[in-house]
Image (tube, rainbow, N blue to C red):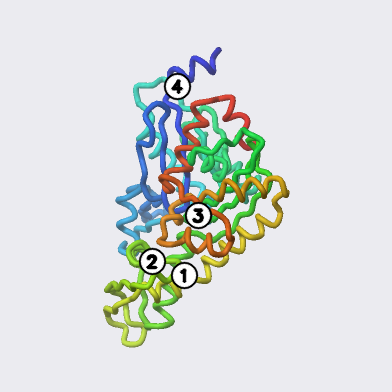
């Protein structure tokens, strides 16, 4: 009775706590917040840390802060790396999403990668409770992504999902509301950015920042050669002369830079397919593989996967929000949520 009453009085939330971005879904309202998982922290003379800004405003500070301010990304490879800063970030998102006139603290669903350890699960749960949650459910990201992509996860048929996030890529085969087999590799959008930074350093003696590498990936990044090459001017610091410098980078060079991390993702997909039971594998041949996550938006990545796996690849309708939308759907049905949540 209390849980029913509490549910009526609170705005329950689903949070896709990602390495690169955090999305917040409010029951009955949809996704109300999508911001970078970045916190700007100022350090006082006594060593105490004070949160200055969170999200988009904090991301603008990356690589541009004085010594006493740090722009921190508290989630590394899909899990909490800085407990205190993550708690402050969660508190910010919960306060922003939860109606302050509500008397009861919200029930919260948080999406986590399948490779998460029991210690890391406890850290996520405790951070959410400390940040103001009444009850916390943890849900595997591929399961949430499958729900968000509109797959029928409760039926006895095989559904395969590839979720390419900022810190990890999760691959899972789902049947009867459970993960039958899954693999996770700590390669995602961040590793793609890192590959571009290393390539420009090695080939052009130019050091560029994380934000520049991300803009290059989004603007001219591609997974396969498409015939016409795009170019882009990028600026950084010349490693030989030590002065600012500008070069022109082509999409073919970016494709070469990204080839190694992309093939690590493909290897993970192939290993998961090898471990899939034959009946479910037959379903995947018919139904195809669903591709979601921010990394799924890389140009021609679905074509590369199709060429390597010889299977149909279906990019989700909105890959970026699929995990948050799926967690929101589970939040709307408490019975389904209890079935798919991690115990």
Q: Residues within 10 Å of mark 4 (few under 14, many from 20)?
A: many
In the rendered image, the residue lying farthest to the bottom is 240
All told, the count of numbered labels is: 4
- Looking at the image, residue 212 sits to the left or right of residue 159; the answer is left
Q: CA distance from mark 1 to mark 3?
A: 14 Å
Q: Residues within 10 Å of mark 3 (few under 14, many from 20)?
A: many
Q: Are marks 1 and 2 in contact (CB under 8 Å)?
A: yes
| Mark 4, residue position | 104
Q: Position of residue 129 (x, y in %)?
A: 52, 34
- The circle drawn on residue 164 is 3
Residue 136 placement: quadrant: top right
Q: Are marks 4 and 3 in contact (CB under 8 Å)?
A: no
Residue 293 against residue 196 in the figure, above or below:
above
The residue nearer to you, when weighing 83 against 233, is: 233
Please say whether residue 67 is visible from this viewpoint.
no
Q: Quadrant of the N terminus?
A: top right
Residue 46 placement: quadrant: bottom left
Please say whether residue 16 is visible from this viewpoint.
yes
């Amino acid at each position: 009775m209390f849980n029913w009453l509490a549910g009526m009085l609170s705005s329950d939330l689903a949070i896709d706590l990602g390495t690169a971005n955090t999305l917040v879904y409010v029951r009955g309202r949809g996704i109300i917040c999508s911001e970078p998982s970045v916190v700007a922290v100022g350090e006082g003379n006594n060593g105490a840390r004070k949160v200055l800004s969170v999200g988009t405003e904090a991301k603008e500070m990356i690589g541009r802060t004085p010594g006493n301010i740090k722009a921190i990304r508290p989630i590394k490879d899909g899990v909490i790396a800085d407990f205190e800063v993550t708690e402050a970030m969660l508190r910010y998102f919960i306060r922003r999403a939860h109606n302050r006139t509500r008397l009861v603290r919200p029930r919260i669903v948080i999406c986590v990668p399948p490779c998460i350890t029991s210690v890391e699960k406890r850290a996520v749960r405790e951070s959410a409770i400390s940040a103001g949650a009444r009850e916390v459910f943890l849900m595997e990201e591929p399961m949430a992504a499958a729900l968000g992509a509109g797959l029928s996860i409760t039926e006895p048929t095989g559904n395969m999902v590839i979720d390419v996030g900022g810190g990890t890529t999760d691959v899972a085969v789902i049947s009867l509301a459970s993960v039958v087999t899954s693999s996770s590799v700590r390669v995602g959008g961040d590793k793609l950015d890192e590959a571009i930074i290393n390539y420009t350093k090695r080939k052009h003696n130019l050091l560029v920042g994380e934000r520049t590498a991300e803009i290059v990936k989004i603007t001219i990044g591609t997974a396969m050669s498409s015939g016409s090459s795009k170019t882009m001017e990028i600026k950084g610091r010349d490693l030989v002369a030590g002065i600012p410098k500008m070069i022109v980078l082509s999409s073919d060079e970016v494709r070469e830079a990204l080839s190694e991390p992309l093939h690590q993702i493909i290897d993970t997909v192939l290993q998961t397919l090898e471990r899939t039971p034959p009946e479910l594998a037959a379903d995947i041949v018919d139904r195809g593989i669903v591709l979601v996550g921010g990394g799924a938006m890389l140009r021609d990545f679905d074509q590369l996967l199709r060429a390597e796996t010889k299977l149909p690849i279906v990019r989700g309708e909105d890959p970026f929000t699929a995990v948050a939308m799926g967690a929101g759907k589970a939040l709307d049905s408490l019975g389904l949520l209890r079935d798919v949540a991690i115990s």
